[in-house]
């Protein structure tokens, strides 16, 4: 029968009892055992727990006529369970937790100062009936002006041809509408950029936790 490796302390761990300590004390002086086993026995007799494999190796190598019964040696002992080592967090998980903690800190800070810092109202385009009416009149006037300019230009160029003059007016109307649309897009984009820059610069955390 193969003897267990006494240097391998993995596996079952038993709580030490007086019969075990007595047996290990005798094993320290047992010359049938190797020097390595005697050193292991000397080290284990002062401990509160004993690896099963080490104890079995010492018992197997000791004198059969003087060693105690194996079942009697284990009488009164119990298994000792060790907690597994905690898993280490990956770098990706650490970064994700750091971002979540930063977001939580920002929300907590905003909640604390919401009664102190005045809330800035975001002005939306055409947020009122007056703005909508004004914009509609402005677009209508611009398109009418474009129609008149195109009509007059084509009328002068093509000897007052009614069809071509009307086509010139329509062309001027379309161009005026495109220019007005382009100007509206540019204005809206600038307003959004200004609003976003203000909102980002208004929040400055006062404290940061040590990382």
Image (tube, rainbow, N blue to C red):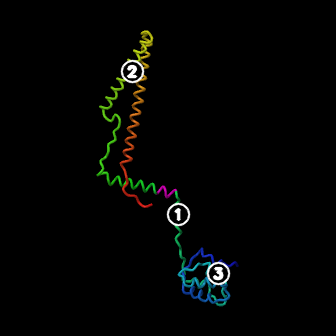
Magenta highlight on residue 206: no
From this viewpoint, which residue is outermost toward the right?
Answer: 1
Describe the element under mark 3 as helix, strand or loop. Answer: helix
Q: Residues within 10 Å of mark 1 (few under 14, many from 20)?
A: few
Contact (Cβ within 8 Å) of mark 2 with mark 3: no
Q: Secondary structure at mark 1?
A: loop
Q: Residue at x 53, y 76 (%)?
A: 80
Q: Nearer the viewer, residue 58 or 88?
A: 88
Residue located 62% across and 86% down the image? 69
Q: Which of the labelled discs sits on residue 88, or is there none?
A: 1
Q: Earlier in the sequence, mark 2 or mark 3?
A: 3
Category of crowding for the residue at label 3, using alpha-carbon neighbours closer than 10 angstroms: few (below 14), some (14–19), many (at least 20): some
Disc sitting over residue 138 in the figure: none
Q: Identify the mark nearer the N-term, 1 or 3.
A: 3
Q: Residue under circle 2?
A: 146
Marks 1 and 2: CB-CB under 8 Å? Answer: no
Quarter occupied by residue 193? top left
**Which residue is pictured at 65% across the width and 89% down the height?**
30
Boundaries of the magenta span: 92-97
Q: How many marks?
A: 3
- How far apart marks 2 and 3 lie (CA) works out to 104 Å
Q: Which mark is residue 57?
A: 3
Quadrant where the image shows the N terminus: bottom right
- Give how far across and how far down residue 39 sits, in percent: 62, 84
Tell me the mark number nearer the camera, choosing from 1 and 3. 1
Rendering quarter of residue 72? bottom right
Expressed as whole percent of the image width and height from the top left, the position of residue 94 reads 49, 58
Element type where label 2 sits in the image: helix
In which image quadrant can residue 157 be found?
A: top left
Q: Nearer the viewer, residue 208 or 104?
A: 208
**x and y, in percent, of residue 192 in the image:** 39, 39
- Which image quarter holds the C terminus? bottom left
């Amino acid at each position: 029968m193969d003897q267990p490796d006494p240097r391998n302390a993995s596996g079952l761990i038993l709580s030490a009892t007086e019969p075990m300590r007595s047996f290990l004390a005798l094993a320290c002086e047992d010359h049938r055992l190797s020097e390595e086993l005697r050193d292991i026995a000397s080290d284990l007799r002062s401990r509160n727990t004993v690896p099963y494999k080490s104890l079995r190796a010492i018992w197997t190598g000791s004198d059969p006529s003087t060693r105690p019964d194996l079942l009697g040696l284990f009488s009164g002992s119990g298994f000792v369970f060790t907690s597994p080592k905690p898993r280490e967090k990956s770098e990706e998980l650490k970064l994700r937790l750091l971002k979540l903690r930063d977001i939580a800190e920002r929300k907590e800070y905003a909640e604390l100062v919401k009664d102190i810092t005045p809330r800035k109202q975001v002005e939306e385009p055409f947020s009122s009936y007056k703005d909508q009416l004004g914009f509609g009149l402005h677009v209508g006037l611009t398109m009418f002006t474009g129609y008149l300019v195109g009509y007059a230009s084509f009328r002068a160029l093509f000897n007052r041809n009614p069809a071509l003059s009307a086509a010139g007016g329509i062309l001027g109307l379309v161009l005026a509408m495109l220019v007005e649309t382009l100007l509206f897009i540019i204005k809206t984009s600038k307003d959004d950029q200004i609003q976003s820059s203000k909102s980002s610069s208004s929040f400055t955390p006062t404290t940061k936790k040590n990382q």
